[in-house]
Amino acid sequence: AASLTHEGALDAALRSDEESPDPALHAYSVARLAMMAHESRMGPETAIDVPGYLNRYRVGVSSGRHHRSPREFDKMAPANFLKFKGIEIERVTQEGFGAALVGHIEWTQERENHDPFMPSEGFGVPLNGSIQFEGTRATLILQDLMEDAEAVIEGREVPLAADFTAPLFFRYFEERDREPNKIMAALRPSAFESTIGMTALEPFARDKTPLILVHGLLATAENWTPFLNLLRQDPILRERYQIVLFNYPTGTPIAENAHHLRSWLKKYRDTYDPKRQLAPMRSMVILGHSMGGILSNMQIRDSGNQLVKLVFKRPIDEIDLEPEAREKLMSLGVFEGNPDIDRAIFMASPHRGSDMATNAIGKIGAWLIRLPFDLVDSVLGGLETVDNLTDYAQNLSKRPRNSVTALRPDNPLLPTVLNLPVANGVQIHSIIAQANQNAPTEKGSDRVVEYWSSHLDEALSEKIVLGYNHSSMVEAEESLNEVWRILYAHVGEPWPGNRR
């Protein structure tokens, strides 16, 4: 059936002919053969005999550029076999030649040892299956669509049938069973310390630029799923970037979560590029939403001794501290901008705080949060006197210390961070939502963060997204197009204009 419908399906893909019956029958036949090859654990060095309507075919597997072997995957299925339940998500597909498939690489301890950023749900890979015929010889081609969603077939460049949403099926549904309750991760952060870390969306690629995504308050990395689904529509993003997600319990103080992010970014570099020889690894992009933008901002600035001066009246070297307390304080308050981050994108980020943290809801939330230990006391408990503490440090002991209280506009940590110098060469972009389309920009708000808090003078670009609130702006068409535009510029690709 695949051989009989090959030419018709190819012509239909080139003409985008949706009325021809050939593409559907051809895709079904190819998918059946791909599943047979997977069940037989076929590789490039093996072949099987398959009977056809008119001939008996000798079927092998291609090992060409961007081609994958069926035996690389623990599971493989036609993409339309995977159904989403319990979530409203736009299915991102591409009409084209062949069959849209999904390959799944399951997590094992051995694989994690080899790739420590492999998520526990494994990797889902979008694939296209097609067959190349030469007489009675047939070659199954499994194209990795994250590398290229087009192919040259019989001298003609053809779009390949693709489903970019189906591979997220594994991540989303396995995470839903395992991910912590977002509210409890904020209210009881100590119970969720094991969830802190970075995971990759796909196996590491030496030639792709890392795009680090950092979620916001009352969220987890899972919240990026709808955004990722839409973001990966773009071919340049799929082919030039690899996405890495940072997860953290959002009730933990900002300085501590920023330290965790800093440590995981270092681990990522030391794992894949310890000698700093890979150019894409030295040109990372970090994108933070909401409070994640503050954490991201603290990765691109040099602290000097400015944050320590918020706590102590005298230089830290002149103060008698226990070694453990000194090390803790230095890890939280003294840092340099990450030399591997070249660009930062902030979405609805409250750089100067939010009035939400001072209203009744914010006060109740701050009161409910319970930390495993008193952060300030753990660092300063060895002091014999509080005479060396600044008023800010002494006031910290009078209110809960957590991410909510840190977002108060009167928290001196926030302007201190903004006054820190940005590491040399880093380019900054802001995407800001304004729920009331008729309000003046300078008085705009996304109902959580005001414009005066999100705006940064040093931003290379600033996009105002009208008619969206703090959460919905992440999936807004204007936001996506702005992120795409920035990512195109980062890798030197000409921007073709809005893609949605």
Image (cartoon, rainbow, N blue to C red):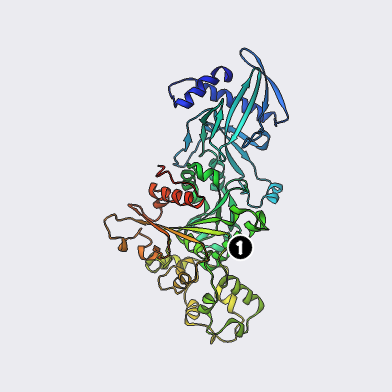
Find numbered disc 1 in the image and state the secondary structure of the residue it sits on. helix
Q: Nearer the viewer, residue 480 or 186?
A: 480
Kindly identify the residue that appears in the image at 70 percent across and 23 percent down: 48
Going by the picture, which residue comes out furthest to the right? 45
Name the residue that disc number 1 marks: 263
Query: Residue 314: image x %, image y %?
Result: 55, 85
**Left or right side of 375 for 108:** right
Locate the N terminus by quadrant: top right
Query: Residue 319: image x %, image y %?
Result: 60, 84
**Left or right side of 391 for 118:** right
**Left or right side of 478 for 78:** right
Number of numbered discs present? 1
Up/down of 251 relative to 281, above or below: below
Kindly identify the residue that appears in the image at 66 percent across and 78 percent down: 323
Going by the picture, which residue comes out furthest to the left? 438
- The reply to whether residue 374 is in sight is no
Query: Residue 9: image x %, image y %?
Result: 51, 22
Locate the C terminus by quadrant: top left
Q: Which of 395 and 361 is in front in this view?
A: 395
Kindly identify the residue that appears in the image at 44 percent across and 24 percent down: 17
Query: Residue 497: image x %, image y %?
Result: 40, 44
Up/down of 415 relative to 181, above or below: below
Q: What residue type is labelled 1?
A: Ser
Q: Examine the image and state in which quarter residue 124 appears.
A: top right
Q: How crowded is mark 1: few (under 14 residues within 10 Å), some or many (20 or more)?
A: few
Q: Examine the image and state in which quarter residue 72 appears.
A: top right
Q: Which of 361 and 269 is in front in this view?
A: 269
- The reply to whether residue 312 is in sight is yes
Kindly identify the residue that appears in the image at 52 percent across and 65 percent down: 424
